[in-house]
Every structure is written in C-alpha cells, then in structure tokens.
Image: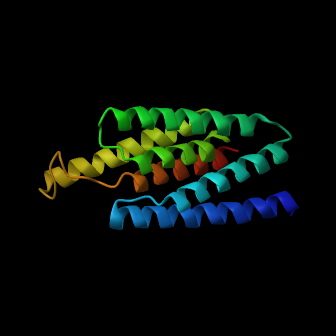
C-alpha cells in the first residue's frame, strides 16, 4: 500500500465522520455548522488532490473546482429564490461538489439528483401519512450527503 493510498483512506474516513456528524446535527437542529461543512470541504479538496496524484492528472482537481462552484451557484440561486434552501445547504453543496467533482462531471449531477429525489420522496410520504404538509421543514443536508456518497461509491465501483 502506497502513502497516497493510506492518506486517501484517512481522508475518506474523516469525510465519512464529518458527513455523519453533519447529517445527525441537521436532523436534530436543522443547522449545518460551518466548522464541519468547511472541514468536509477541506477534506474533499485533499481527496481531489490525492486522486490527481494517483492518476497523474490535474483533471480531478479541475473537476472538483468546477463541481464545487457549480453546485454552490445552483444552491445559492435556489436559496435566493426562496425555495426553502438554507445557507448551510448552499455551503454544503460546495463541499459536495468538491467531493463528487473529482470523480467526473456526472458525479455532482447524480449526487444532486439523488438528493432531490430522496428528499422529495420522504416529503411525499410524510404528507401521505399526515406527518407534515407542504410547509413542513425537512432537513435537506442528510439527503444531499447520501446522494453524494452514493455517487462517489458508484464511481469507485465503476472504476
């Protein structure tokens, strides 16, 4: 096992812990603490750099930068439009874009789609069982993070 591989294992473990903590906190408080979001962003940037080293290509770094910027802009526009996105979701989107963008342009799209679909399904179920209505606030961070990890896991499995 190379030093790069060992460092990647450490950073993936850190990103997993940060993601789990963010999801739990968002569910409990409907807040995404900046320290954890920025920690995830830094960890994701480190993973992108190690992926670039591993593949001897700058493409993962460029993809991470573009993914982070694109998801930040998308979620910022949704936030400004008053669609229920909080500022924490906007910052988390940038971190997720960094995390997924290193795995190709499809990964941030898949992560975003999975987050919206899974969050929407939960909202529909909550309305159907009369546990909420159209105005019920649902923490979106856990769905965003789940979509990101499915997208990243899919890219690892695909090779």
Q: Is residue 70 above or below residue 115?
A: above
Q: Residue at x 78, y 51 (%)?
A: 50
In the image, residue 140 lies at what x, y percent?
37, 51
Q: Residue at x 43, y 36 (%)?
A: 76
In the image, residue 150 lies at what x, y percent?
53, 50
Which quadrant of the structure image shows residue 75? Answer: top left
Q: Is residue 90 above or below residue 33?
A: above
Residue found at the far left of this picture: 130
Judging depth in this view, the residue of 80 and 113 nearest the camera is 80
Side of 79 where 106 appears, left or right: right
Side of 139 where 1 appears, left or right: right
Q: Residue at x 83, y 48 (%)?
A: 54
Q: Is residue 80 above or below residue 41?
A: above
In the image, residue 77 lies at what x, y percent?
41, 32
Side of 28 where 132 appears, left or right: left
Q: Residue at x 20, y 54 (%)?
A: 126
Which quadrant of the structure image shows residue 81? Answer: top left
**Quarter occupied by the N terminus:** bottom right
Judging depth in this view, the residue of 145 and 66 nearest the camera is 66
In the image, residue 154 lies at what x, y percent?
59, 47
Judging depth in this view, the residue of 60 and 66 nearest the camera is 66
């Amino acid at each position: 096992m190379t030093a790069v591989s060992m460092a990647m294992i450490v950073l993936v473990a850190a990103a997993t812990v940060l993601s789990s903590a963010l999801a739990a906190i968002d569910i409990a408080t409907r807040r995404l603490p900046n320290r954890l979001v920025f920690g995830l962003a830094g960890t994701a940037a480190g993973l992108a750099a190690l992926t670039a080293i591993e593949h001897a290509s700058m493409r993962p770094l460029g993809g991470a930068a573009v993914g982070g910027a694109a998801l930040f802009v998308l979620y910022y526009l949704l936030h400004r439009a008053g669609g229920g996105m909080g500022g924490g979701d906007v910052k988390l989107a940038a971190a997720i874009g960094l995390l997924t963008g290193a795995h190709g342009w499809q990964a941030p799209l898949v992560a975003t789609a999975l987050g919206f679909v899974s969050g929407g399904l939960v909202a529909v179920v909550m309305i159907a069982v009369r546990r909420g209505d159209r105005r019920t606030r649902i923490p979106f961070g856990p769905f965003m993070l789940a979509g990101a990890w499915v997208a990243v896991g899919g890219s690892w499995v695909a090779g």
